[in-house]
Image (cartoon, helix red, strand yellow):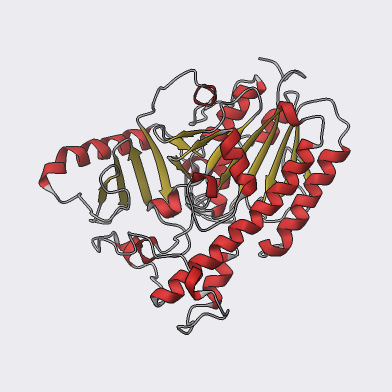
Amino acid sequence: MSGASNSCPNILFVTTDQQHIDTIAAAGCPHVSTPNIDRLVREGVSFSQSYSTNPLCSPARSSWFTGRPTLETGVVVNDRAIRSDIPNIGQWLGTRGYEPVYVGKWHVPQAWPVAVPGFTTIPAGHGGAGNIGDGAIARATQGWIRNRSGSAPFFLTVNFLQPHDICQFVSMHQNAPDKIPYDGLEDVLPELPANFGYDPREPEPVAKKRRWAWTARQWRYYLWSYYRQIEMVDAELGRVLEALDDSPYARNTLVIFTSDHGEGCAHHQQALKNLLYDEAARVPFVVWCPDRVRQNECDREHLVSGLDIMSTVCDYAGLEPPPDVRGRSLRPLLEGTTTDCREFVAAEVTQTGRMIRTQDYKYVVYQDDPVAQLFDMKEDPGETRNLADEAKYADVLAEHRRLLREWEAGLDPAPVPGL
């Protein structure tokens, strides 16, 4: 296919930073008010088994914009650039009939750039402060949508920072006293999750991650504060959707909403990210488009990945994806034309951690670490019982090890800097 036509949909790709999957009121979270994300959920398709390729900012983003795992993009830690021989989605679409526009956080490698390769860039945001910068991102996006006069279909990506400010909250409350700073808040604090405890048989890189010495009250206050940051970014999303509704593009724009990674949220007594437990690795993923995408559908069966962004966008744009992309188009699932399930999704963390998530199990291993993790995700979705050492699961463990070996063998790893 040579290029997009005017009949192809516009595409609005909206992202948040560090959003736990269970933070949407319409998806069952009782602790937040998220009317704008709720609207996308009610009027679109959401995926509950959606995984980040790498639960850290820069690596996950490199996969969104290339369709390649972080072993291949070379962005295995923060603040690295995508390897130069892999095109990003703006470069690919921009030479094939689309108008690519970038607003907000990039972080591959610069967090708040004035230029992103392949995109018209609208500088907006404020480094390190989502409660300040997200308003600027939303208003810049509103202005662009309301003043646009081009005729080509657009790919507009809007990248908010919240609820990433939870990092600052955690840093500021490392030694917090066992009291709440606001009167009347005690009775509305969220309860701790059922898997606040954890199986102590963990690989060393997981076991040595800090578990905060907070009281139960402080853990609950942390959760309450995190949910308020979710509400902040939901309000800014509302400004963007309002501008889209008021524009000529509303009926012909595919909206994709997701997050780069999750947040500990007191599961396994963890805060923050960079873990392969579901609280960090699983993320919201919602797609909305009038007359094209099914409405009010929650897909709890199919495994999806941040790798799927590139292939899905190209499918709707009427274009072949770049060579060697590893994701798949979700269009058949979005439109209800197939129930085909992939066998697994993979994820990475740091330079040594790997995850294989199949329909029933999750396998996690770190290079040169003798401790593997195997969880039955149907019977133990909280990942509290490590089955890797149980003889009855030896065949399951061996199968997941095989899947990981074959997955890695099929990749084209980026050169490692310094070697």
Residue lying at the far bottom in this picture: please name it: 177
Is residue 102 among the parts visible in the rendering?
A: no
Specify the quadrant that holds the N terminus. top right
In the drawing, does residue 309 fall left or right of residue 190? right
Q: Is residue 48 above or below residue 8?
A: below
Q: Residue at x 25, y 52 (%)?
A: 372
Q: How many marks?
A: 0
In the drawing, does residue 245 fall left or right of residue 366? right
Q: Quadrant of residue 313?
A: top right
Q: Residue at x 45, y 40 (%)?
A: 48
Is residue 293 among the parts visible in the rendering?
A: yes
Q: Nearer the viewer, residue 261 or 109?
A: 261
Percent from the top left, x then y, of residue 413?
A: 46, 40
In the drawing, does residue 174 fall left or right of residue 85? left
Percent from the top left, x then y, of residue 344?
A: 36, 34
Percent from the top left, x then y, of residue 251?
A: 73, 27
Percent from the top left, x then y, of residue 415?
A: 50, 44
Residue lying at the far left in this picture: please name it: 391
